[in-house]
Amino acid sequence: MDRLLTGLQPSGNLTIGNYSGGIKQVINYQNNYETFLFVPDMHATTVTQDPELLHKNIRSAVGVYLACGVDVTKPNMHVYIQSENLYHANLSWLLECHTYYGELSRMHQFKEKSKLHENFTCGLFTYPVLMAADILLYDAKYVPTGIDQKQHVELARNIAERFNNRYKDDYFVVPEPVIPSIGAKIRDLQDPTKKMSKSTANPKASVFLLDPPNVIKKKIMGAQTDSEARIAFDEENKPGVSNLLTIYSVFAEMPIEAVVAKFEGGGYGDLKKGLVEVLSEKLTVIQDNYNKIMTSGIIDDALDAGRDFTEKIAKEKYETIRKVVGYGRI
Ligand code: ATP
Ligand code: MG
C-alpha cells in the first residue's frame, strides 16, 4: 500500500474548509492507502497559543477526525500527535540545512501571515520545512490538502529531490499533493476573495464543524454574495455565490453542475436556505458522533497506538538520514 499523509493544525476549531480540503479526502482514500493522519501541534505554535486551549483543541481535533468517519479500527490508519514524536523536529533541523532562505521567502502563506503580526516568529518562517519533515519521515507519496498548501508540498518535493541528488540515492520518496477538484479553496463567508481559515478573527467568516444549526443558519444567511441576483458558478466574477454552490456540492456529494441546475432561476435566499439544510443535517450527524467519542476512551487508545507505530518508522528513517549527512560517530 502506498502511503498517504496529512494533518490539520489545532490552531482553532476545524472548519468546513478543513473538512473539504483535508478530512473528506482522508475518508475517501482511507481504504486504499496506508494513512498517516496527525495533529500538527508544533505548527500551531508558529503563532501565540494559549496552552490550555491548545491541549483542548488537540483532543477536539482528533474527536472531529473520528466523528467525520476516520476509521481507527483499520490497521492501515495511524492517528498521532506531532509533538509526541521527537523525530519530526530533528529531521526538520537537518532539512533546514538543505533549504534556501530564498525558497522560504517565496512562500505565500508566510507573506500573508507575517503581515498579520507586528512581530512574527522564526517558526512562522521555517514551518514549511517542519512540514516537509512531517511528510518525508514517513515516505508518504500522497499528501491530500487544499490549494493553500500546494506550495508547501512542492517545497517538500524540492527538498526531497535536492537531498536525493546531493547524496546520490533515493533516500526520500518525492511526495505529491492531492487537491480535490471541487472544494480545494472554500472561501471566507464575509470576504469571498480570501480563503476560509479557522484562525480568522471574524467568527462570521467561517462555519465550524461543531457549530449548532442556529449558528450555521445565521452565518450562511449572512454570507456575502453580489447584487446580480443570478445563480451561476463563476469563481472569478461571482466568488460569493460560487462559494455557496461549492459548499453545497461538497456536503451534499453532488456535482457542481447538478447544484447549479437545482437552484438556477431562483434567488440567493433559496440557495442559502438549501445550504443551511444540507450543512445542518450533515454536521448534526458529525456532532452526535463527536459527543459520543469525546466521552469514550477511544481517542487516547488511538493516539497511543498511532504514536508507538509511527515513532518506530520515524526513528529508522531519521537514523538513516542523519548518518547520510555525517552526524554523529561512524
Ligand atoms: P490556520 O488559519 O490556522 O492556518 P486553516 O483553516 O488554514 O487554519 P490548516 O491547519 O492550515 O487550516 O490546514 C489544514 C488543512 O485544511 C490543509 O490541508 C489545508 O489545505 C486545508 N484547508 C484549509 N483551509 C481550507 C479551505 N478554506 N478550503 C479547503 N481546504 C482548506
Ligand atoms: Mg492554514
Image (cartoon, rainbow, N blue to C red):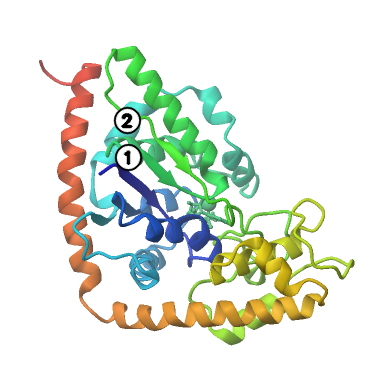
Q: Do the residues labelled 2 and 1 touch (CB within 8 Å)?
A: yes
Tell me where residue 164 appears, x and y as whole percent: 33, 19
Image quadrant where residue 96 sits: top left
How many numbered markers are drawn? 2
Image quadrant where residue 141 sits: top left
Q: Establish if 185 lies above or below 290.
A: above
Tell me where residue 281 appears, x and y as whole percent: 52, 82
Q: What residue type is labelled 2?
A: Val
Q: Establish if 157 lies above or below 279.
A: above
Q: Residue at x 54, y 37 (%)?
A: 151
Q: What residue type is labelled 1?
A: Ala
Q: Residue at x 22, y 72 (%)?
A: 298
- Considering the numbered disc 1 on the image, is that residue within a helix, a strand or a loop? loop
Q: Which is nearer the eye, 229 or 298?
A: 229
Classify the position of the N terminus by image quarter.
top left
Question: Looking at the image, which residue sits at the far bottom?
Answer: 214
Tell me where residue 80 appears, x and y as whole percent: 27, 56
Looking at the image, tell me whether mark 2 or mark 1 is earlier in sequence order.
Answer: 1
From the Cβ of disc 2, is ligand 1 less than 8 Å away?
A: no
- Considering the numbered disc 2 on the image, is that residue within a helix, a strand or a loop? loop
Disc number for residue 140: 1
Disc number for residue 173: 2
Tell me where residue 109 appears, x and y as whole percent: 58, 42
Q: Which residue is drawn at 33% across and 54% down?
A: 37
Question: Looking at the image, which residue sits at the far left?
Answer: 330
- Please say whether residue 266 is visible from this viewpoint: yes
